Image: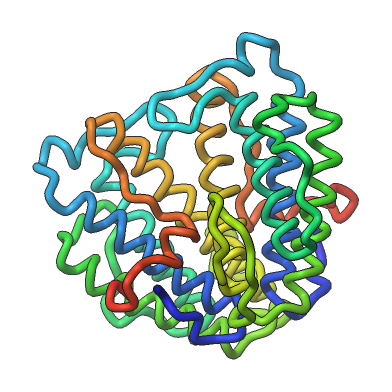
């Protein structure tokens, strides 16, 4: 049974988010190249592209929160392989959880967009992170189902029953 | 532009969660019967059933804190119409937001689930509530898109940019 280690629920939401990201990544890791290129209409794109987009976006959200560029930035349209993503997901997740432990929703950070720099409440970054990753995990699970593969259960109840070592 | 009113990110996460579900519900309220019955492989079911399930599940998550369980689960009753669903989602969202403001993730609740008595940290119920609704909204968005209907934007950036009056 997973243990809640922090009274701050946003920290725990981000720990679940990391666990779920790893869950879907591991479900996709055994797929062959053709399967990784499969998609379902009305989703983001292929499994490969969606995984990269999910993790790269989280890297950008963390960078926005901290104000520091990532040490090893993931490149758009350059799938780095499962080993790199599996190393990045917990690292980014730990960074996001650390930010959640220290920041209030009403604190602000600087977000760089195509139109310039805007000041955004920190709470919006956490909302965006959790919403964005969950949406794309859901799409990945749909594609896995399309392939005839039972997708991983990434819900809170399953998380509660997960072994602590899975985190 | 929306104002984040609470320094607790979890409270803002539930404000976003309710806003996103209502935004999707309002768009789906304009669909005809055939569109409401549409589905896509790998999702829970039809738009109608998925909306009902989101509202029914959130009613039960709220009840886990208040002890006020519905006499009959909404999914057993069936789709009650958009107006009734809207009221239920607003009511459950208010309860979950209020609970989020006061409960530590580590507080253990005793509750009945699937015929068993269980002790579950409050944090798990919040994680389940946020993850569950987001997954099912993403499924409905895919079903809408496959029917040629553009789903509403429900991400954190849009939540931040919408007029306060829409909250």
The structure residue drawn at horizontal position 52% and vertical position 40%, both measured from the top left corner, is B138
Q: With respect to residue B98, does B92 lie above or below?
A: above
Of A14 and B64, which appears nearest the observer? B64
Which residue lies at the image location 55% right of the left edge and 41% below the top edge? B136
B22 on left or right of B150: right
Q: Position of residue B133 (x, y in %)?
A: 60, 48
Tell me which corner region of the image, top left, top right, bottom left or bottom right, holds residue A10: bottom right
Which residue sits at x=49%, y=72%? Answer: A14
Looking at the image, residue B134 lies above or below residue A58? above
**Who is closer to the viewer here, B73 or A139?**
B73
Residue B160 appears anywhere in the view: no
Q: Quadrant of residue B161?
A: bottom right
Residue A24 can be seen, yes or no = yes
Q: Residue B1's x, y, as percent?
A: 80, 59
- Residue visible at 38% across and 61% down in the picture: A20
Furthest-bottom residue in this view:
A102
Horizontal and vertical percent position of residue A28? 21, 49
The answer to whether B14 appears left or right of A23 in the picture is right
- Tell me the colour scheme of the image: rainbow
Residue A9 image point, x, y percent: 60, 76
Q: Above or below — where is B152 with respect to A62?
A: above
> Looking at the rendering, which quadrant does residue B65 occupy?
bottom right
Q: Residue furthest right?
A: B165
């Amino acid at each position: 049974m997973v243990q809640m280690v922090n009274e701050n629920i946003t920290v725990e939401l981000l720990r679940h988010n990391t666990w779920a990201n790893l869950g879907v990544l591991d479900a996709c890791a055994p797929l062959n190249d053709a399967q990784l290129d499969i998609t379902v209409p009305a989703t983001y794109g292929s499994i490969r592209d969606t995984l990269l987009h999910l993790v790269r976006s989280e890297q950008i959200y963390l960078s926005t929160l901290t104000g520091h560029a990532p040490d090893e930035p993931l490149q758009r349209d350059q799938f780095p392989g499962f080993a790199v993503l599996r190393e990045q997901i917990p690292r980014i997740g730990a960074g996001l959880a650390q930010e959640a432990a220290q920041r209030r929703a009403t604190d602000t950070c600087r977000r760089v967009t195509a139109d310039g720099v805007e000041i955004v409440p920190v709470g919006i970054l956490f909302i965006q992170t959790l919403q964005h990753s969950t949406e794309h995990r859901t799409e990945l699970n749909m594609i896995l189902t399309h392939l005839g593969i039972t997708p991983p259960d990434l819900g809170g109840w399953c998380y509660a029953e997960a072994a602590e070592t899975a985190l | 532009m929306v104002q984040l009113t609470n320094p607790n990110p979890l409270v803002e996460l539930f404000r976003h969660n309710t806003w996103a579900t209502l935004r999707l519900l309002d768009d789906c309220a304009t669909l005809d019967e055939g569109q409401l019955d549409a589905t896509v492989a790998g999702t829970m079911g039809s738009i109608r059933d998925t909306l009902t399930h989101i509202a029914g599940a959130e009613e039960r998550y709220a009840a886990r804190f208040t002890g006020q369980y519905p006499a009959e689960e909404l999914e057993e009753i069936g789709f009650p119409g958009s107006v009734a669903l809207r009221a239920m989602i607003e009511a459950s969202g208010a309860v979950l937001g209020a609970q989020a403001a006061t409960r530590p993730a580590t507080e253990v609740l005793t509750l009945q689930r699937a015929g068993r008595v269980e002790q579950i940290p409050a944090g798990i119920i919040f994680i389940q509530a946020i993850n569950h609704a987001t997954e099912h909204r993403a499924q409905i968005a895919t079903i809408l898109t496959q029917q040629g209907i553009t789903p509403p934007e429900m991400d954190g950036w849009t939540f931040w940019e919408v007029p306060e009056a829409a909250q």
